[in-house]
Image: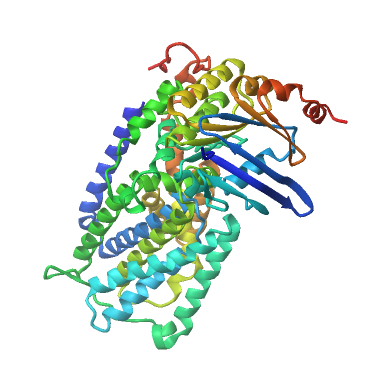
Amino acid sequence: MTPVLEVRNLRKTFGGIVAVDDVSFNVNDGEILGIIGPNGSGKSTLFNCILGQLQPSAGEVFLHGKAVTRTRPCDLNRLGVSRTFQLLQIFPQLTVRENLILAGQEHQGTMLSRLFGRRDAGLTGAANQMIEFFRLGHLADEKAGGLSYGQQKLLDAAMAFMAGPRLVLLDEPAGGVNLTMLQSLRERLRAINAEQGATFVVIEHNMEFVMALCTRIVVLAEGRIIAEGDPADVRRNPKVIEAYLGH
Amino acid sequence: MMVSKKTLAVAAMALSVVFLLVAPFLFKPYGVFILSTWVVMTIAAIGLNLTLGYAGQVSLAQAAFVGIGSYITAYLTTRGWPFWSTYMLAGTSCFIVGWLLGYPALRVQHHYLAFVTLAFNTLVYLIFRNEEWLTRGIYGIMNIPRPEVLGWSMAKPIPFYYFLLAHLALISAATWALIQSPWGRAFIAVRENPIRALSLGVDTRRYTLMAFALGAGLGGISGSLYAALVQFIDPTPFALGLSLNLLLMVIVGGSGYFFGPFLGAVVAVLLPEWLRFAQGYYLMGYAALVMLLMIFCPTGLLGFADRLLTPKAKSDSGPNPVLPDSAAPQKAAG
């Protein structure tokens, strides 16, 4: 079966620094792949290269077997690939509902139909469902900028799911989220994975979160893949332990 | 509180509309002329508010578009073209030039973009002044005719004022529809977080160019009406000063608020006239007032009103932060 995402020999250099060094891996349909690694190991740069936010220096990216290297992020998103960022990225002056409607609107119709066509086209309903799903109901009409950090983090994740993506790349979804909300976030991600069959790639530092959520893990250190396998194996791998504990 | 805010806005709007409709009978011809200028400048400021207020792209070139629109109407109507054809041409030409001016905005932002657009304004001004074969340079173009509507002449000040007012009404309605459409949300997204917008499928490149083109198009329409209003144009009004003045209108009124340009144009066009009783000091007084305004309400008059009328978020959701994990979604108080 063709993998959902195939990354082949991806490389990214900044001047003399090699941030991502010849990285290759597959993501299979329906799995939750975790990417871990110490700070500065190239995880976020890898995401940015896959998603067209950065131009890779070499290598290729395939989506369902089709080359998508250097495709613009907005076009990639319309092909069903969605993402969140390491730092919270929302639209503070829009309400929670408007944030979500925005996250879905560009997937319908054309520029012209978005200007002259039907105003709603089911987006409000879809946004309300997402609001309920992430339990943000009481905040739907609040400006997103006024929410607490944890609530914004949930909204941030909810936006990534608004257009029913097939593949979602999450960059540290658990960063700065408290314990109760973490559990709720994990449940939501699992539910979306199980019910809608969305495939996930998750960058995370919180080991407990990763081990409990992911079905397979890739470990990066200094831009290279040093280990790959199911969570229990990776945890015992001496190379991984060394990379985390230092020399 | 939400209801009272809305009621207040509707009441203020109704009063303004009534005032604008009866105003010509309350003022001398000069007053009607100033009000007409207000209408024309408001249209240009609505355009800039789309580019700057909603889409967040700094432009110091709005006067250039008002100028291009003015010269197109002036040049062609004095050669026998019907007003309406020159009006459409002014709008479309500026739309296209604005689209092209948007390209630098895809590469540079903020004050760098301000300088690019400033240079464009200066360039256009120099063309107006120096290309005498086309624009008659500093001698200007005289005897610009006013249009007819269904055989009714708009030549007299009061009919022409209503003619302008009708334009303002239509343009406001169209702009309102635009910002309520997905485009309006996309513009705000481009302003607030272009990187996230791009990752959510928003073609930020196309929307940025559109914001420039639409803002410029409204500038061109405003210019076309301006030419018919003043009936004589020379390069002077379209120098950088007007661009800065339009920027002032958008910021003082409330950048990114629909009614911001209307109010900003009151401050920039009408207020100096009302302050004339102070004679030699009126410009000083005006400058001081604008400075105070910017110090005490940097988000503009409407931003200030918004803050006054919006209940504090804290008292709304109670002292304890509501956790989304709680079994049943809690309703905010009230």
Residue A186 pos. (x, y %): 55, 21
Query: If the image is split into quadrants, where does the C terminus of chain B sit?
Result: top left
Q: Is residue B238 visible?
A: yes
In this view, B9 is above or below A72: above
Left or right relative to B188: residue A26: right
Q: Residue at x 51, y 16 (%)?
A: B323
Residue lying farthest to the front in this orientation: A1
- How many tags in the picture? 0
Q: Quadrant of residue B167?
A: bottom left
Residue lying farthest to the left in this orientation: B151
Q: Is residue B255 visible?
A: no
Q: Quadrant of residue A140?
A: top left
Which of these two is toward me, B118 or A232? A232
In this view, B230 is above or below A228: below
Which of these two is toward me, B87 or B188? B188
Q: Residue at x 31, y 48 (%)?
A: B176
Which of these two is toward me, A170 or A101? A170
Residue B280 pos. (x, y %): 48, 62
Which of these two is toward me, A151 or A145? A151
Left or right relative to B74: residue B102: right
Residue A77 pos. (x, y %): 48, 44
In this view, A212 is above or below B180: above
Residue lying farthest to the bottom in this orientation: B133
Query: If the image is split into quadrants, where does the N terminus of chain B sit?
Result: top left
Residue lying farthest to the top in this orientation: B327
Residue B220 pos. (x, y %): 36, 67
Q: Colour scheme of this structure image? A: rainbow
Q: Residue at x 49, y 44 (%)?
A: B197
